[in-house]
Amino acid sequence: MDVYEAVTSRRAVRGFTDRYVPREVLERVLSAAAWAPSGSNLQPWHPYVVTGGPLAEIKKRAGERLAAGDAWDEPEYEQYPPVLKSPYRERRSAFGEQRYGALGIPREDVEARQRAASANWDCFGAPAALFCYIDRDLGPAQWSDTGMYLQTVMLLLRAEGLHSCPQMAWAKFHRSVAEVLSPPAELMLFCGMSIGFEDVTVDNARTGRAPIGETVTFVEG
């Protein structure tokens, strides 16, 4: 699989089989991903790769909180601005329409949308997950570096025939994750990432992208 195919075939898959993901594959991916760029080579990412019993325990704790109607954890960072301006507001709305429309859930059915969203905390059935932490003392540039690292991981997973789904949703239950992983206090959970083999029986429609004329400016001589 060449780089272009890896990029264009990568998407947020929300349905996985329980097929085992070999540790040696994950080690190969993460060893190569370590070459992702970072300013002054800080390498600010702190991934925890979780499978088996520990992942089942994280899913169980999150599921119990959902069933009990527990409030989400106090946010440790702002995922979106309080008010999204155009064109970001329209893009987010279009995503919601496509995501839930593919599931046959109308906009007004809030309860059904919440049930669909709750699959996040089961990792969509994936047998492996990555929880990515970042040091609380680091700034926006290091968050950007961490994003480049995560993208590198996802592209390398495609080269191995695997799929993934990056999930900021896990930051809403960061306490439950920490109860199992026991990260140092100076680390903050940025996101989770479900990893596994795609369940092709699940509708994983890919959301569209804006044309480059809408996002890219060419300045030519």
Image (tube, rainbow, N blue to C red):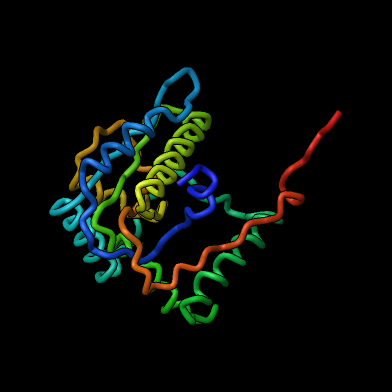
Quadrant location of residue 134? top left
Q: Which residue is drawn at the image coordinates 77% and 40% (left, top)?
A: 217
Percent position of residue 68, x then y:
25, 70
Going by the image, does 22 lie left or right of 165?
A: left
Q: Closest to the observer: 199 or 45?
A: 199
Compared with residue 120, is residue 3 higher up or lower down, i.e. above or below?
above
Q: In this view, which residue lies farthest toward the left?
A: 53
Q: In this view, which residue lies farthest toward the front?
A: 1
Say which quadrant the C terminus sits in.
top right
Q: Which residue is drawn at the image coordinates 34% and 67% (left, top)?
A: 199
Compared with residue 126, is residue 137 higher up or lower down, i.e. above or below?
above
Compared with residue 8, is residue 49 higher up or lower down, i.e. above or below?
above
Q: Which residue is drawn at the image coordinates 54% and 68% (left, top)?
A: 96
Q: Which residue is drawn at the image coordinates 49% and 46% (left, top)?
A: 78
Going by the image, does 93 lie left or right of 29?
A: right
Going by the image, does 195 lie left or right of 41?
A: left
Percent position of residue 76, x then y:
40, 44
Percent position of residue 101, x then y:
53, 77
Going by the image, does 126 lie left or right of 105?
A: left
